[in-house]
Amino acid sequence: MDWIKNLQNLGFGSRLKRLSDQIMNSANEVYKELGIDFESRWFVTFNLLYKSEKPLSISELAKALGFSHPAVIKITNILIKKELIVSMKDNSDERKHLLQLSDRGKKLANELDPLWTQFKISTNELLDEIEIDMNMVFAKFEEALSRKSLSMRIVDNYKNYLLSNITIRRYSPEYNQYFKSLNIQWLEKYFKVEETDLVLLDNPKMIIDNSGMILFAEYENMIVGTAAIVKITSDKAEICKMAVFEDYQGKQIGKKLLTEIINYCKAANFQEIVLTTDEKLYKAISLYRSFGFKICEKSEANLKGYEREKSCIAMKITLRNNDEN
């Protein structure tokens, strides 16, 4: 069984790499058989310098080839060692080095030119045989990657997968223990548990009785996150006591909670949501910013006299009216 082929799209990159290796190795076999000291991996860099009307810098080579600077430097160092290219200082900027073919490199390039023509003819024969315009395929593939990289696509899809496996539950007395344990964990890690914290953590129904709500995130049949929505005025709410168990951070729990909080507040006709956080909670701040929260004056927050509020950061977001959604 050809395992890479069997993987189909999951092994797409490995299959391309294997195909590329076959093509590059074929070229190396040709050079070896003809007794030419040249390698296929040098070709595009060497050929670009051969065709260029002027010496080129590393940055210019990297840009033209779409390679990283380290990759270009690695190849050019080999070519310099082989005495096929030479490096010189730029007259307009002594910190900048320019590269061009040496006399030996030019001689080799002229010898290789007719061989490269046969490479092109043979490649055309191969592509005609499979009846696919690979240049068009590559162009479309590269265009799609320029719009959104494969890594971004994978990460975004994985995050969506995680989000789809999180269920948000509304307050029920059976979740009281999680409301307390979740918040105790982060408070003890970053600050300390104050008496004011315990009043709320031991009596979460106070929030519900005052027209607020507590949400809980369930993941893999476990309650792993929570957040409270406290009503301040008829059109203003506060997010507080938002926490995710440390072992489950990075699994989109906070994002799911915050999404549901905003949806809840919109449905309840709140026009503004405020919260307080701390600069040491940089991951939380980054999450809030991604949803549109902005830093505001502390006077706009619902401060309660915690010791940690001396260094707190206040943030808020203004919600659109429901008819604008």
Image: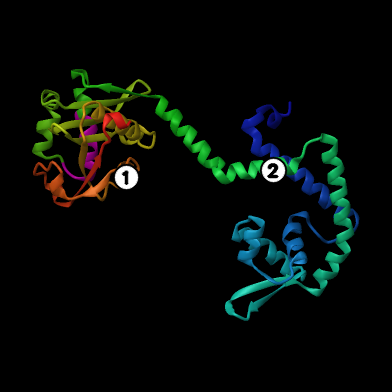
Q: Which residue sits furthest front? A: 323
Q: Nearer the viewer, residue 147 or 99?
A: 147
Q: Is residue 73 above or below residue 185?
A: below
Identify residue type, mark 1.
Answer: Arg
What residue do we see at 63% from left, 56% from top? 67
At label 2, which amino acid type do we have?
Answer: Phe
Asked whether residue 183 is drawn in magenta, I would say yes
Badge 2 crowding class, 10 Å Cα cut-off, few under 14, some 14 to 19, many 20 or more, is: few
- Locate residue 249: give its quadrant: top left
Q: Residue 227 at x, y = what percent?
A: 24, 31
Quadrant for residue 72, please give it. Answer: bottom right
Judging from the image, what secondary structure is the residue with disc 1 in? helix
Earlier along the polypeptide chain: callout 2 or callout 1? 2
Q: Residue at x 24, y 21 (%)?
A: 170
Q: How is the image coloured?
A: rainbow
| Residue 90 in the image, given as x and y percentages of width and height | 63, 78
Residue located at (17% from left, 50% from top)? 297
> In this orientation, which residue lies closer to the viewer: 23 or 145?
145
Q: In this view, does 320 lie to the left or right of 132?
A: left
Give the residue at mark 1: 289
Q: Mark 2 points at which residue?
A: 138
Magenta part, dominant SS: helix
- Return the x and y of residue 303 as percentages of the image width and height: 12, 43
Q: Of all residues shown, which one is farthest toward the bottom?
A: 91
Circle 2 SS class: helix
Tell me the magenta residue range: 180-192
Label 1, residues with CA under 10 Å away: few <14, some 14-19, many ≥20: some
Q: In this view, does 298 lie to the left or right of 182?
A: left
